[in-house]
Amino acid sequence: TICRPQLADQGVRILCEVDPWLVQMPEITDGVSFDTIAREWRCKWSLEDKASLAGAQKELDAILAETKAVKGVKHVQRVVCGGCGDFKVIVALDAASFGEWEKAGFAPEAAFLDKLKAVKGLQRVETQTYTLMTM
């Protein structure tokens, strides 16, 4: 079975209508396979005042255990760039489990994004879904 990307309001969604027990490595197209689907939560923090970065980290700390407990989570990564003010959280799941999490609204995503939007100095709170494959 082949999974395919579909444009959505907030970027690209990966649609897979497969039995997860039968497919070990889905493909977007010939030769482009993946075993991991990630959801990224991101924002920009103020380079002039690192209090916004500290606020983002505080909100991540508050939902980290719940996020790691999501069925199928392989890892949760945090990316911070001191040059451009990126703060990113990448939640990577095995491809077979991702659809279930999507149906659950990516919890605790909504609450986390609302908390980020309330932190003074944070801007451009966004999400994105993409595939990952170790090469």
Image (spheres, rainbow, N blue to C red):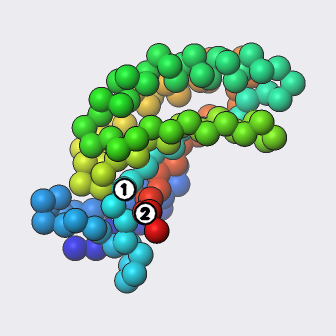
Q: Is residue 114 left or right of residue 133?
A: right
Q: Is mark 1 on a helix, strand or loop?
A: strand
Name which quarter of the figure residue 76 lies in: top left
Q: Is residue 56 above or below residue 35?
A: above
Tell me what residue is drawn at x 25 percent, y 38 percent. Answer: 71
Q: Are marks 1 and 2 in contact (CB under 8 Å)?
A: yes
Residue ID at (87%, 24%): 48
Position of 86 compared to 7: left or right?
right
Residue 115 in picture, x, y percent from top left: 55, 19
Residue 103 at x, y percent in the picture = 27, 42
**Secondary element at tag 2:** loop
Reading the image, the residue beneath label 1 is: 36
Q: Which residue lies furthest to the bottom in this view?
A: 30
Image quarter for residue 59?
A: top right
| Residue receiving disc 2 | 133
Return the residue found at the far right: 48
Q: Which amino acid does label 1 sit on?
A: Thr
Residue shown at the point (37%, 83%) measured from the top left: 30
The image position of residue 38, as x and y in percent, is 43, 49
Task: Tell me if I can see residue 99 in this picture.
Answer: no
User: Which kind of residue does numbered mark 2 sit on?
Assistant: Met
Using the image as rendered, state which of residue 8 and residue 92 is in the foreground.
Answer: 92
Percent coordinates x, y for residue 6 in the rendering: 42, 64
Vertically, is 28 above or below 21? below
Can the viewer see residue 21? yes
Residue, far front: 135
Judge from the rendering whether residue 109 lies leftward or rightward of residue 80; answer left or right: left
Question: How many labels sit on residues?
Answer: 2
Residue 16: image tag: none
Name the residue located 50 percent from the left edge and 39 percent from the top edge: 77
**Comes first in the chain, label 1 or label 2:** 1
Residue 121 as seen in the image, left or right of residue 129? right
